[in-house]
Amino acid sequence: MAIYDETIKSKKIKSPARRVKRIKRPRKLGGPLTTRGPKAFVKRPVQVDSPGDRKPAWFFGTLPEWYVYWYLTKKEKLTVDLEFSFQSSLFGGRQALGGLVIDFLIIDRFFPPGLVINVQGEFWHRLTSSQRAKDLLDGIRLRQRGYTVVYVLEDAVLRHLEPTMEKALLGIQEYSDTP
């Protein structure tokens, strides 16, 4: 037995794989991702004074559209799909030839059948003359059907949200160079 023990001790048994040194990452500033204990049931205050720098992940529109959506829901306290709809389809929408998808349709008793608010972004609506012509024709079609159409510019929404939206909700076109 003594000879057997010496042969085992003399052979070094290697580990099956080499250990990789872990990289230590610095901890990010801020609290934990989830709160446990009694603080978990405390309701956080809802931010009402501004829409924030970024749109939430569940919102599928652009940033200026998020600002308008936020204003209608938080400041004006309108209910989505009851008092206004976002990205609503008219005349068949994207499914039919000649259909329209408008940004906001506000169902209002002052503007029967409704108030249409379209956000005019620099890239999507004002970059080429063909895009501007299409918006002009869409506005004419909506006005022929009795809708009140108001176009708001992206810059005006991002810089001066409240005065721009107050005028838009009254049906006042703020800029004359929009269709």
Image (cartoon, rainbow, N blue to C red):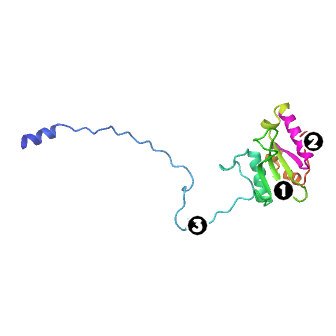
Query: Which amino acid type is marked by label 1?
Result: Ile
Give the alpha-carbon distance from disc 1 to disc 3, as whole Å: 37 Å
Give the alpha-carbon distance from disc 2 to disc 1, as whole Å: 25 Å
Q: Looking at the image, is mark 2 or mark 1 nearer the viewer?
A: 1
Which is nearer the N-term, disc 1 or disc 3? Answer: 3
Prevailing secondary structure of the magenta residues: helix
- CB within 8 Å, label 2 to label 1: no
Circle 2: is it few (<14), some (14-19), or many (20+) Cα within 10 Å? Answer: few
Q: Is residue 34 above or below residue 120?
A: below
Q: Magenta segment, which residues?
A: 131-155
Residue at numbered disc 3: 41
- Secondary element under disc 1, as helix, strand or loop, is loop
Q: Quadrant of the N terminus?
A: top left
Residue at numbered disc 2: 176
Q: Which of the two residues, 114 or 163, is positioned nearer the viewer here?
A: 114
- Secondary element under disc 2, as helix, strand or loop, is loop
Task: Answer left or right for 88 relative to 175.
Answer: left
- CB within 8 Å, label 1 to label 3: no
Residue 63 sits in which quadrant? Answer: top right
User: Percent position (x, y) of residue 96?
Assistant: 78, 40
Which is nearer the N-term, disc 2 or disc 1? Answer: 1
Q: Is residue 40 above or below residue 112?
A: below
Residue at numbered disc 1: 107
Residue 125 sits in which quadrant? Answer: top right
In this view, which residue lies farthest toward the bottom?
38
